Image (cartoon, grey):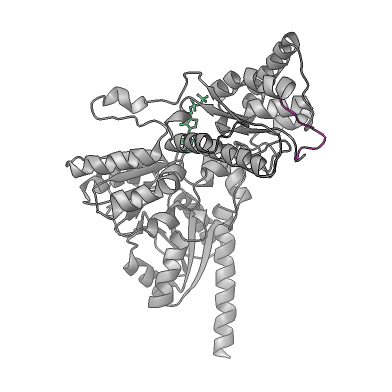
Amino acid sequence: MPQRLDVQRLRATAARLRTNIVKMIAVAGSGHNGGALSAADVITYLYFHQMRIDPADPRWPDRDRFVMSKGHCCPALYAALAERGYFSEDVLWTLRDIGSPLQGHPDMTKTPGIDMTTGSLGQGISSAVGIALGGKLDRKDYRVYCMIGDGELQEGQVWEAAMAAAHYRLDNLTVIVDNNKLETDGRFAKRFPDRFFNMGAAEQNMIGVAAGLATTGKLPFASTFAVFASLRASEQIRTSVAYPKLNVKIVATNAGVEICGDGATHQAIEDLAVMRAIPNMLVVSPSDPVTTRKAVLAIADHMGPVYMRLGRQEAAVLHDEETPFTLGKMTHLRQGRDLTIIAAGHMVEQALLAADVLAAQGVAARVLDCHTIKPIDEAAIVAAAAETGGIVTAEDHSVIGGLGSAVCELVSRERPTRVHRVGLADCFASSGRDYRRLMAHYRLDAQEIVRQAMALLEKRTTWTTETNA
Ligand SMILES: Cc1ncc(C[n+]2csc(CCOP(=O)(O)OP(=O)(O)O)c2C)c(N)n1
């Protein structure tokens, strides 16, 4: 039921929420303070005056709904839900921890009181339209409230949703724009003001604009988070960039589980699979600052579409300046004859650590840095299969469709060999506060590479004995 607090009590409640927002984000170590604080008054009004809800029955079918389309501001919503009694205040201090019900972005499967999973700007409002439409179909009189950011208004999907809402006369839907005039940055703009174009939170448009620029002979580097580049804008990449073979370089940052605190909505775990499947696309995943710099220069020289995947955390230097870098050719980091570890991106560091552990146990592992996922270095893989007899792959990506799959596809045809894949099992990962702990939790580390290497060696011994018998 609506609580109908008076203005004075609403003010006091909003102040408590603000205090908790700041505390939660401080404890979590990351999060969006500004947009959460600016949302506090409206959320307080909705949850403590306006909305017909029952915290004892969060899924009550007749309840009013709230969709936080600007999902990164969820600490405000979490604070309100705790204050309203959906869960105890203690839970707030678990924000963004591994397995916490309070993920970096709202997750309707984990948090009581969350009506819709959000985090990718522009998507929440469409879901709110659907919930309102469902209410009409069911002849229910609940209302749907949706909060979106002013920056979020740049996403085209917002306007598609607005048109659908008007078309279907959804008078049970209220969309609130938190017009706080805040938005994320333009750091590079200061250095190259005449060559930097900020397309805002509008990834599909950004790719289309890059494609258009390329037709005029420019060399556009289009950059956003990997999840938004490879998934949100995948069809624009496919049809406007890859199909006409335009000279667009997509630099996808914050890839993999390693992004950590933001959680599943922001962890690109399928981008390599999607990008590999697109014809004409070159896919690059450098492992350290040295290769990243070399890769940027190399892809600028390469004529045609490129997807370059980068992580978020500071990466260790693994290569020296003298190590040759050629697109499509793996870099040998360690020689070895007992088995081969092929790794990409920040898992290369883990592969080297694993090789050290294996060496101490008398196993000489070859380590290959597979900075070009497509076209993959077939010769190096076939040689590894022939000379070392077993391969462990390692990537911060789903085990489906990325580096491990590419290696399996090749050896199954050219040189059938046992391959063990280290990667994210087929699941969405949690938020985490510390990326190394999170990576270890999902077995994306040196220890798992060692485990897989030993398992592979053991199976090979058994297999050899069996075939010899
Ligand atoms: C599709 C998508 N693109 C980019 C982001 C990354 N991002 C998170 S917050 C933000 C700025 C949002 O600004 P606004 O909507 O005004 O929210 P507020 O200022 O209230 O935090 C961006 C671009 C995202 N979450 N989703």
Q: As drawn, which residue projects farthest toward the top?
A: 8
Residue 150 magenta-drawn? no
Residue 56 magenta-drawn? yes
Q: As drawn, which residue projects farthest toward the bottom?
A: 469
Residue 157 screen position, x and y as percent = 46, 38
Residue 167 screen position, x and y as percent = 50, 37
Quarter of the rendering occupied by the N terminus: top right
Q: Residue at x 58, y 55 (%)?
A: 447
Q: As drawn, which residue projects farthest toward the right?
A: 56
Range covered by the magenta-colored residues: 51-59
Total numbered circles: 0
Closer to the camera, 2 or 154? 2
Q: Which residue is drawn at 57% across and 23% down?
A: 33
403 vs 107, left or right, is left
Quarter of the rendering occupied by the C terminus: bottom right
Residue 364 screen position, x and y as percent = 47, 65
236 vs 435, left or right, is left
Q: Magenta region, mostly helix, strand or loop?
A: loop
Evaluate whether residue 194 shows in this view: yes
138 vs 402, left or right, is right
Closer to the camera, 166 or 129? 166
Evaluate whether residue 119 shows in this view: no
Residue 42: name its quadrant. Answer: top right
In this view, 45 is above or below 340: above
Q: Residue at x 44, y 42 (%)?
A: 228
Closer to the camera, 65 or 459? 65
In this view, 126 is above or below 372: above
Residue 321: name its quadrant. Answer: top left
Closer to the camera, 160 or 19? 160
Residue 125 screen position, x and y as percent = 54, 35
Q: Which residue is drawn at 69% across and 39% down?
A: 100
